[in-house]
Image (cartoon, grey):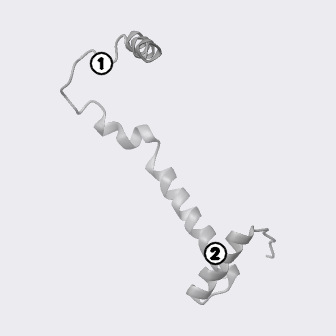
Amino acid sequence: MPTSVRLDIKTERTLERLARKMDASKSAVLREAVDALARQSLQADKAGSLFERVQDLIGCVSGGAANLSTRTGAGFRRVLAQKGNR
């Protein structure tokens, strides 16, 4: 099925170089690129969300102060005030 694609000069030159390197037509290179992108996208969908991919790591580190996430606003204001005094 014919499809028209408009490319900028840089992309067109890249496509031409790839086609020569692969000894293939520009259409064949584009078909292969779309297929590779589709496979990559499907694999990412199978991998799940970012949370699902790192779920086993959450809470597995121990050490450090237990209150690092408390009163962060006060600490941030203190840092900004010190920078303002310089």
The amino acid type, in three-letter code, at marker 1 is Leu
Residue 64's image quarter? top left
Q: Position of residue 72 (x, y in %)?
A: 38, 14
Residue topped by disc 2? 14
- Residue in the foreground of this view, choosing between 28 and 77: 77
Q: Earlier in the sequence, mark 2 or mark 1?
A: 2
Residue topped by disc 1? 68
Q: Is residue 66 left or right of residue 49?
A: left
The amino acid type, in three-letter code, at marker 2 is Thr
- Residue in the foreground of this view, choosing between 20 and 80: 80
Q: CA distance from mark 2 to mark 1?
A: 49 Å
Q: Residue at x 34, y 12 (%)?
A: 70
Q: Residue at x 62, y 82 (%)?
A: 17
Q: What crowding class fits label 1: few (fewer than 14 Cα within 10 Å), some (14-19), or many (20 or more)? A: few
Residue 36's image quarter? bottom right
Residue 32's image quarter? bottom right
